[in-house]
Image: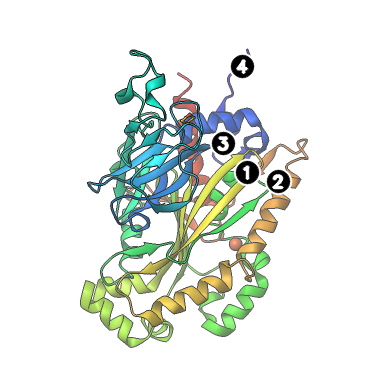
Amino acid sequence: MNKPRDYGDLARVDRTHVSLYTDPEVFHDEMERIFYRSWVYVAHDSEIPNPGDYKTTFIGLVPVIVSRDLAGKVHVLVNRCTHRGSTVCPTEKGNANSFVCPYHGWEFAPDGRLVTVGLPKGYNEGEIDIPKLGLREAAKIDSYRGIIFASLLEVPDITLEQKLSGIRPVIDLYMDLSPVGEVVVGQSGVYKHPYHGNWKIQTEGSVEGYHAIFTHQTALDVMARKMGAFLRGFQNSGLKGRDVGYGNNVLEVYKLTDEQVHQRWPKHYIDMLKEAHGEQRAMDALRNRFNLVIFPNFAILEYQFRVIRPIAPDFTEVRIYHTTLKGAPPDINLKRVREHEFFYGPASFGGPDDYAAFDRIQEGFKAQMVPWVHLNRGYLSEQTDAQGQRIGDLTQETQQRAPYYEYRRLMARAEG
Ligand code: FES
Ligand code: FE
C-alpha cells in the first residue's frame, strides 16, 4: 500500500504542489474528504420554488436531485436507482410527481421514497423491502438566504452557520441589491463552460485580482471607456482580498464613491433601495462590488452564481447562472444582463479568456519537473484584522491562499 500523502506538505501556506492539480489519487481523496463529507453548494431556493420542482446537479462526481417535496421540504437525493443503478432523473430542471427509473420502472416520490416497482408480482415475499429502498439522501442540508448546501455522506464537523460566519455580511450586501433582499437564479438558463484543467484553478481564479489587466486588457479598455475611470489604478487601488475563514474568501473588485454610485445607477433604483433598506445600507450595497468564493465549489461574481463541477483531475465544468434582483425595476435587471453578457457570455470579452488561460495552466502542469505553484504574492505583508481575517491587497494572493487552510484541515482530518 502506498504511503498516505502529506497534504500539509503538498498544500503549503505559500505554494501548492503540482500533483494537487494532476494526480488522480489526489482527486479521489478530494472527492472523498472534501466533496462528500463537508458543505457543498447545490442550488438556490428560487430554482425550485414550487412543490414537485427539482433540479439535477452534482456533488463531486455524484449525480444528485435537489427536489422540493409535495409538502415544500427540500431534499438532496442521490440520482441513482436503488435497484440496478440507473439515474432516475435525466433532465436538468422540471416539476414531477415522481421519478421513474427507465430500466424496470421503479418509481420514487419527490422526497425519495420508493413508491412502487415494475411488475411487483415477480418478487417473492422477503425479496424486496420497499421502505428501505428509497433514494439515498444527503446526510445534511441547510441554507442561508436561499443558498442551499448539502453534505452527502456525513454530518459535517462544523454547522453551516459556522462555515458561513465570515462571509455572511458579504452575502447580505449582495442580496440587498434587491429591494426585497432576494435574487432569482438562472431565470435565463445556465451557461456551461467546460475547461481542460483542475477544479481548483477556477476556485483560485474566481477571486483573481492579479491577472485582470493582462488577461482582460481589451475588456478593461472598453469598460473604462463605457463606465469611467474608476476601474483603473489596480496596484494602489486600496482594494483588498480577504480570507474570511473555512476556505471562503472575498475579493473587492471596486468601491464606488457616492458620486460614482449616482453615475452608475439611476435615481429611481437608488431611491427604491434607500426606501427598502435605509440610506446607509442601500449605499453600502451599491458602493461595493466583490467576488466571493465559498469553498469548495461555489462563487458569486457581480451578476452570477458560479458553480464548479470537478469531473476529472484535468477536466472541470463551470456552470454560470445569471441572477435577477427580485423586485428591482426591469431596466436595472436588463442593465445587469447586458453587463453580464459583455464580460461573461460565451462570445464575450472576459470569461472565455479566463478559460483559455486555465487550459494553458493545465498544459503547463505537464512539466512536472517544475513542481510548485506559487501563491506567495503579498504573503509577507499580509495583515490579520480583529476578527482574525487575513487581508492583502487586490493584486496579491491572500484570497487564493485562503482555500488551502480549509483544504489542509479537511484532507488531513479524514486520514485519522
Ligand atoms: Fe432502476 Fe431497475 S435499474 S428499476
Ligand atoms: Fe478573469
Q: Nearer the viewer, residue 6 or 23?
A: 23
Kindly tell me whether residue 211 is visible in this rendering: yes
Image-quadrant location for residue 141: top left
Q: Secondary structure at mark 2?
A: helix
Where residue 3 is drawn, which disc sits there?
4
Say if mark 4 contacts mark 3, CB within 8 Å: no
Kindly tell me whether residue 39 is visible in this rendering: no
Residue at disc 1, CB closer than 8 Å to ligand 2? no
Q: Secondary structure at mark 4?
A: loop
Residue 409 left/right relative to 314: left
Q: Give the CA distance from mark 2 to mark 3.
A: 20 Å
Q: Earlier in the sequence, mark 2 or mark 4?
A: 4
Quickly name the residue at label 1.
198
Crowdedness of circle 1 by 10 Å Cα count: few (<14), some, many (20+)? many
Say if mark 1 contacts mark 3, CB within 8 Å: no
Q: What residue do we see at 55% from left, 72% from top? A: 341
Q: Nearer the viewer, mark 4 or mark 3?
A: 4
Where residue 12 is drawn, which disc sits there?
3
Q: Earlier in the sequence, mark 1 or mark 2?
A: 1
**Residue 216 coordinates in the image, percent (x, y):** 64, 68
Q: Nearer the viewer, residue 122 or 288?
A: 122
Quickly name the residue at label 2.
362
Image-quadrant location for residue 182: bottom left
Is 301 rendered above or below residue 119?
Answer: below
Label 3 sits on what residue type? Arg
Say if mark 2 contacts mark 3, CB within 8 Å: no
**Residue 34 coordinates in the image, percent (x, y):** 47, 34
